[in-house]
Image: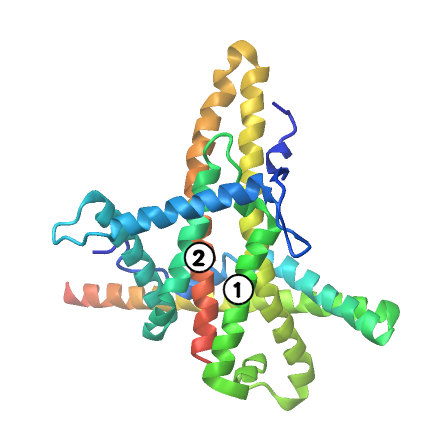
Amino acid sequence: MSLKKEGPDPKDWSGYTVGLNFGMSAIVGMLFGLWADSAFGTKPWGVLIGLFMGMVAGFRVMWQATMSNTEELGEKNQTENEAKKTDKTDV
Amino acid sequence: MSLDPLHQFEIHKVYDLSLMGYDISLTNQSIWMLGTSLVLCLLMMVGSLKTAKVPSRMQGFVEVTIDFIQSMVKDTAGKEGLKLLPFVATVFLFIAALNLVGMIPGSFTSTSSLYINGALALTVFVLVWIIGLFKHGFKFFGMFCPAGTPILMMPLIVPLEIISFFARPATLTVRLAANMVAGHVLLKIFAFFCIAMGAFFAVPFIPLLAITALEIFVALLQAYIFTILTCVYLNDALHLH
């Protein structure tokens, strides 16, 4: 016996995390930059590059999540349309 | 009673303790956490003490809960992930119990602290590293360069992958803490409105009731999301792609 027979596909959850992931990616990138600054003494450049890279990483994750979800939706719609077509031919 | 909606998250020492120079005093937070863990352990132990063919209520509760977590792990991390069921089940039950205990008026919501969630998320993060390195060796670092990346793009893609990999535990931490803090602050503000509006207390009271129900749902949902993302990350470590 189980509460949910069909668990959600892990890909469905990637969409939920996108908003926060963007912000946290930027912050983590900036922290990497701060560390690089203190380690190599490259003062403003580490933070700037890190922040920029973090934002790009956030956008990349967002893009990947959106694409994988829309691809799935597209496939679902396609199979539904095909099912409708076969229904019609049956009638 | 304080009107400050954040007053409920203040931590203060209850009993002074120190071990080898480290301050390990019992705070209101650690007492609530210890109590919750104890009650949770007792609940689970009593439920699995006598296993009858026709389960008692306690046994039924334990079986349904564990079965639910098991199917969740199986769906997200595959059959291999089932080895990690004890860990994942502990994380889920711990967070769900702390969130639900936080809904008791006057109690402390331990999952509203960044460092409690941070410790949990770091445990998951370290576990991902251990599993990945033990299972795949140095191939595990291959997950930082996705398949089919042109060599020219490598210096750009690899740092991006590393940043998004390290952002995962941070996201786990902040999501849980932010959801719990926001919900409890909202409850407190609406409760204050009830008192402040005097005769018209019913106006904010009805939304307060609805928000309370929503918060109980959110408490379980956040535990579920934390666990399912844990499973997704463990899945990445188990099955490199």
* Residue drawn at point x = 62 percent, y = 50 percent: B24
User: What percent of the width, then of the height, locates residue B125?
Assistant: 54, 67
| Rendered view: B35 above or below B70 | above
What is the number of callouts on the image? 2
User: What percent of the width, then of the height, locates residue A22?
Assistant: 62, 60
Element marked by disc 1: helix
Q: Which mark is residue B91?
A: 2
Can the viewer see residue A19?
no
Q: 10 Å neighbourhood of mark 2: few (<14), some, or many (≥20)?
A: many
Look at mark 1 in the image and give the residue it sits on: B123
**Image quarter for residue A61?**
bottom right
* Residue drawn at point x = 48 percent, y = 27 percent: B208
| Rendered view: A88 above or below B38 | below
**Image quarter for residue A87?**
bottom left
Chain hosting mark 1: B
Element marked by disc 2: helix
Asked whether A85 or A66 is in front, the reply is: A66
- Compared across the picture, whether B121 is left or right of A85 comes to right
For the residues labelled 2 and 1, say whether their Cβ atoms are less than 8 Å apart.
yes
Q: 10 Å neighbourhood of mark 1: few (<14), some, or many (≥20)?
A: some
- Compared across the picture, whether B153 is left or right of A51 comes to left
Can the viewer see residue A72?
yes
Q: How is the image coloured?
A: rainbow
User: What percent of the width, then of the height, locates residue B1?
Assistant: 60, 22
In three-dimensional space, the C-alpha distance between marks 2 and 1, rounded to whole angstroms, equals 10 Å
Disc 1 marks a residue whose amino acid type is Thr
* Residue drawn at point x = 18 percent, y = 54 percent: B51
User: What percent of the width, then of the height, locates residue B5?
Assistant: 62, 31
